[in-house]
Amino acid sequence: MAAELRWDDAEDIGIALSDQFPEVNPLELRFTDLHRYVTELPTFVDDAKMSNEGKLEAIQMAWFEEYQDKTR
């Protein structure tokens, strides 16, 4: 996992979110909440304003893959 996370690190962010919030189904989150979760990660260093729908969706799908792996 990357030491510092940026918006383009969707897979690493998904893993970090899955570790921090193992019970949360990411498909049930609003993008505003997902954005907050990402920017509050201790290793997230990117500009909060640089997100967009495509980046949030990539993170959500990466997190969902991790979520599915843990709930199977």
Image (cartoon, rainbow, N blue to C red):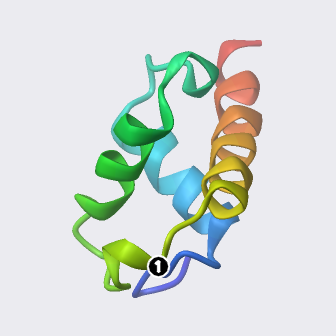
Per the image, the residue denoted by label 1 is: 50
Residue at horizontal 64%, vertical 79%?
8
Q: Is residue 50 above or below residue 17?
A: below
Quadrant of the image occupied by residue 72: top right
Residue at horizontal 70%, vertical 48%?
57
Residue at horizontal 64%, vertical 42%?
60
Q: Position of residue 50 (x, y in %)?
A: 47, 79
Q: Is residue 45 above or below residue 42?
A: below
Judge by depth and name the residue closer to the eye, 51 or 71: 51
Q: Position of residue 4 (x, y in %)?
A: 40, 87
Judge by depth and name the residue closer to the eye, 7 or 13: 7
Q: Residues within 10 Å of mark 1 (few under 14, many from 20)?
A: few
Quadrant of the image occupied by residue 20: top left
Task: Please give left or right for residue 58 compared with residue 37 in the image.
Answer: right
Q: Secondary structure at mark 1?
A: helix
Q: Position of residue 11 (x, y in %)?
A: 69, 63
